[in-house]
Image: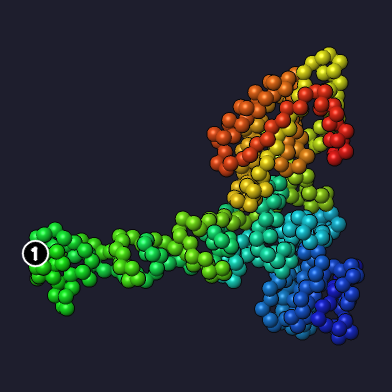
């Protein structure tokens, strides 16, 4: 079958004929690839994994799959199709041919799979973060922080595996990483510093910077007014010091400071916030999502840690059955609701990865407190439901107290936990509400 290639920046009739290519000029028509001519821009809304060819002598801001200065010969088209063939074959492994809508999450997974390469970070001084992801350049979210958020979200769902790439110090005001470091006065913050030798007058014990001793070409002790003539006999130079020429403050070590090249905020060294960046590679779960065409539902990450974790629909059915047993034999049952009130703030404060790691650690704490007869579900990422057969609300409160105390001891970030022990009679009333959202 011929390739249907959308041509942008060139009239279709001026393009060379090729037995395996059918040129298109309407972006609404289904295409197997898009070709950009003479610096034309990629039309918005196209699937990010769509193969892209560029015939332009200009420096491109797009990660093209095949590039050449000009389209010069039929042999060049043959080379282009040979480069695109393995990409097309791998796209065929994915649901919908791998051409998922921008921003779906599957688009990023499909880019990595179809190009058979991880999503690697690379240094880029023009980027506000000082890094970019070349594979995503011009295809996924334009903002590098939006790309990082999307990648971290996919990694949090175990669809991508992270590997540390770089740590970047960020401005505390604008969160960008383009910081110019300088040494500053510990008193006034000026960078107008000079280094001078320390002079120690042996006889009276006074020591200070050499500038305090200099009178013309002579060294005169400012304390006892004696002239220092012989090095090693009258005086020594035990080291160096820093002096601020703005306020004349003396210091042994200046203070590191950073000037943000974007918002011009000047911050102390300890105020700069480190942000870790990662390379990402597809996991088996990510490949399975590509083949099914669906991302797994987001929720508190207890799947794989606690064996009795169920989708909400199944959880409702199981809970309904347990309620019938509890009512028939007058046995206690409690539905526990565990909320994370500040999850959004945690993610904003520490990033998706650190917030996700904290939630996973909390999930482990939770699992250690549950019994094999309990079962759980997570209808959304800040809420966990725990069905606790043979447990009264008072007993459940005791379990929640232990969970809260363990979280305070072991979690580095301040997680605001909200516990509610719902008795069996009220849990029955909540089933319809749960079923409606399942």
Which residue corresponds to the image point at 9% horizontal and 60% vertical from the top-left?
A: 203
Quarter of the rendering occupied by the C terminus: top right
Where is residue 211? Give x, y as percent. 22, 71
* Left or right position of 182 against 19: left
Quadrant of the rendered structure where residue 229 is? Answer: bottom left
Between 137 and 266, the residue placed more toward the observer is 266
Where is residue 362? Give x, y as percent. 63, 37
Q: Is residue 189 visible?
A: yes
Where is residue 157? Give x, y as percent. 71, 46
Question: Mark 1 — residue?
Answer: 233
Classed neighbour count for the residue bearing mark 1: other residues with Cα under 10 Å, few (<14), some (14–19), many (≥20): few
Is 130 located above or below residue 288 in the figure?
A: below
Q: Is residue 82 visible?
A: no
Is 210 located above or below residue 361 in the figure?
A: below
Query: Judging from the image, what secondary structure is the residue with disc 1 in?
Result: loop
Is 82 located above or below residue 281 in the figure?
A: below
Between 38 and 380, the residue placed more toward the observer is 380
Which residue corresponds to the image point at 75% horizontal and 18% vertical from the top-left?
A: 390
Quadrant of the rendered structure where residue 124 is? Answer: bottom right
Between 65 and 324, the residue placed more toward the observer is 324
* Left or right position of 40 against 265: right
Report the label total: 1
Where is residue 274? Give x, y as percent. 53, 55
Between 256 and 23, the residue placed more toward the observer is 256
* Left or right position of 30 against 254: right
Which residue corresponds to the image point at 72% horizontal and 75% vertical from the top-left?
A: 67
Which residue corresponds to the image point at 48% horizontal and 62% vertical from the top-left?
A: 267
Quadrant of the rendered structure where residue 405 is? Answer: top right
Quarter of the rendering occupied by the N terminus: bottom right
């Amino acid at each position: 079958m011929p390739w249907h290639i959308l041509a942008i920046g060139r009239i279709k009739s001026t393009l060379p004929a090729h037995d395996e290519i059918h040129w298109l000029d309407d972006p609404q028509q289904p295409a197997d690839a898009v070709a950009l001519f003479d610096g034309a821009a990629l039309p918005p809304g196209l699937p990010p994994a769509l193969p892209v060819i560029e015939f332009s002598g200009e420096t491109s801001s797009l990660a093209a799959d095949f590039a050449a200065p000009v389209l010069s010969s039929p042999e060049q088209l043959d080379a282009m199709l040979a480069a695109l063939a393995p990409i097309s074959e791998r796209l065929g492994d994915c649901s919908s041919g791998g051409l998922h809508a921008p921003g779906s999450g599957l688009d990023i997974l499909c880019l990595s799979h179809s190009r058979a390469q991880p999503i690697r970070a690379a240094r880029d001084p023009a980027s506000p973060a000082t890094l970019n992801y070349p594979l995503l350049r011009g295809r996924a979210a334009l903002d590098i922080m939006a790309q990082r958020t999307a990648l971290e979200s996919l990694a949090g769902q175990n669809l991508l595996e992270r590997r540390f790439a770089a740590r970047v110090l960020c401005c505390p005001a604008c969160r960008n990483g383009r910081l110019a470091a300088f040494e500053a006065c510990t008193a006034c913050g000026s960078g107008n510093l000079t280094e001078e030798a320390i002079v120690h007058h042996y006889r009276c014990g006074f020591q200070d910077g050499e500038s305090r001793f200099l009178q013309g070409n002579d060294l005169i002790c400012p304390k006892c007014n004696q002239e220092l003539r012989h090095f090693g006999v009258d005086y020594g130079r035990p080291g160096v010091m820093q002096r601020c020429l703005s306020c004349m403050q003396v210091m042994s070590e200046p203070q590191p400071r950073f000037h943000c090249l974007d918002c011009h905020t000047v911050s102390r060294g300890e105020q700069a916030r480190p942000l870790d960046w990662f390379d990402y590679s597809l996991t088996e779960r990510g490949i399975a999502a590509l083949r099914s065409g669906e991302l797994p539902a987001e929720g508190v990450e207890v799947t794989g840690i606690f064996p009795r974790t169920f989708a909400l629909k199944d959880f409702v059915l199981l809970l309904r059955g347990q309620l019938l047993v509890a009512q028939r034999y007058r046995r206690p049952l409690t539905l526990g609701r565990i909320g994370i009130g500040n999850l959004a703030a945690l993610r904003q404060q520490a990033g998706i990865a650190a917030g996700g790691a904290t939630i996973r650690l909390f999930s482990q704490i939770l699992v250690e407190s549950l019994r094999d007869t309990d079962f759980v579900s997570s209808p959304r990422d800040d809420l966990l439901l725990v069905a606790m057969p043979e447990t009264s609300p008072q007993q459940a409160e005791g379990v929640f107290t232990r969970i809260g105390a363990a979280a305070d001891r072991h979690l580095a970030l301040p997680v605001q936990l909200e516990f509610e022990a719902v008795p069996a009679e009220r849990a029955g009333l909540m089933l319809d509400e749960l079923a409606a959202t399942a």
